[in-house]
């Protein structure tokens, strides 16, 4: 075997290794892209990043402080023909006290419509300390024409919030929901906004 033949053989082997590494790299990148949305959603719910509220594992804080905080409730719709609003605009509670608030949704369209709500908390730093025990968010809800549904949310503000320097004097937290239409096999109606504002059945909308 000549020296040139050996060199060519080594080059071919090197090219095969480089090609295999590239395929593995791009395959890994594609897998990471598919996993990014659910992983980011889990990260936000676990850390409260971006104003995402915590999903409480227990129904009570364990202690209640002798200090009041006001929680304001906000509601918005995006491309869904519903009247969606909080029953009460705000509530003043003790920090650590478990409380139930209510939202109301009414389908104003002439056929059944399915919606899903996303949420966030302001200020964003308060997200990790706003614990939802029960919530209608990220759950598909179908309302018949003219049907009204009471949508409760149970929550408490973690007493550890007073240990955060930036939040120690916080007096008000705003809990905001936005209701989106859920994309089904058949469109809701041609008169509704374009499908760009609809949420697919498989899309994990983050709500920020």
Image (cartoon, rainbow, N blue to C red):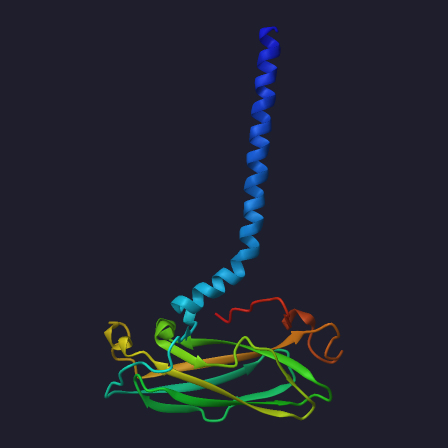
Q: Is residue 198 left or right of residue 110?
A: left
Q: Is residue 163 left or right of residue 197?
A: left
Measured as percent of width and height from the top left, residue 152 is found at 49, 88
Q: Quadrant of the N terminus?
A: top right
Say if residue 49 shows up in the picture: no
Taking 199 as reference, is 82 above or below it?
Answer: below
Q: Residue 190: which quarter of the image?
A: bottom right
Q: Residue at the spot x=56%, y=30% of the render?
A: 18
Say if residue 104 shows up in the picture: yes
Taking 10 as reference, is 178 above or below it?
Answer: below
Q: Residue 129: which quarter of the image?
A: bottom left
Measured as percent of width and height from the top left, residue 175 is found at 43, 81
Measured as percent of width and height from the top left, residue 71 is found at 38, 86
Nearest to the observer: residue 91 or residue 59: 59
Q: Is residue 101 left or right of residue 78?
A: left
Q: Residue at the spot x=38%, y=72% of the render?
A: 124
Nearest to the observer: residue 86 or residue 53: 53
Measured as percent of width and height from the top left, residue 196 is found at 66, 69
Q: Residue furthest front?
A: 58
């Amino acid at each position: 075997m000549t020296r040139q033949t050996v060199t060519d053989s080594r080059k071919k082997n090197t090219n095969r290794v480089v090609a295999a590494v590239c395929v593995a790299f791009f395959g890994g990148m594609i897998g990471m892209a598919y996993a990014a949305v659910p992983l980011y959603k889990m990260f936000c719910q676990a850390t409260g990043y971006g104003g995402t509220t915590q999903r409480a594992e227990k129904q009570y804080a364990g202690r209640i402080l002798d200090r009041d905080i006001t929680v304001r409730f906000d509601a918005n719709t995006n491309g869904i023909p519903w009247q969606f609003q909080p029953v009460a605009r705000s509530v003043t509670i003790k920090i650590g006290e478990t409380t139930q608030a209510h939202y109301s949704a009414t389908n104003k369209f002439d056929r059944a419509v399915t919606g899903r709500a996303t949420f966030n908390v302001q200020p964003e730093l308060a997200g990790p300390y706003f614990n939802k025990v029960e919530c209608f968010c990220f759950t598909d809800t179908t309302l018949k024409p003219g049907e009204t549904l009471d949508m409760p949310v149970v929550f408490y503000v973690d007493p550890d919030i007073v240990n955060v320097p930036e939040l120690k004097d916080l007096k008000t937290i705003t809990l905001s929901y936005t209701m989106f239409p859920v994309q089904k096999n058949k469109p809701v109606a041609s008169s509704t906004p374009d499908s760009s504002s609809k949420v697919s059945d498989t899309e994990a909308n983050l709500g920020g």
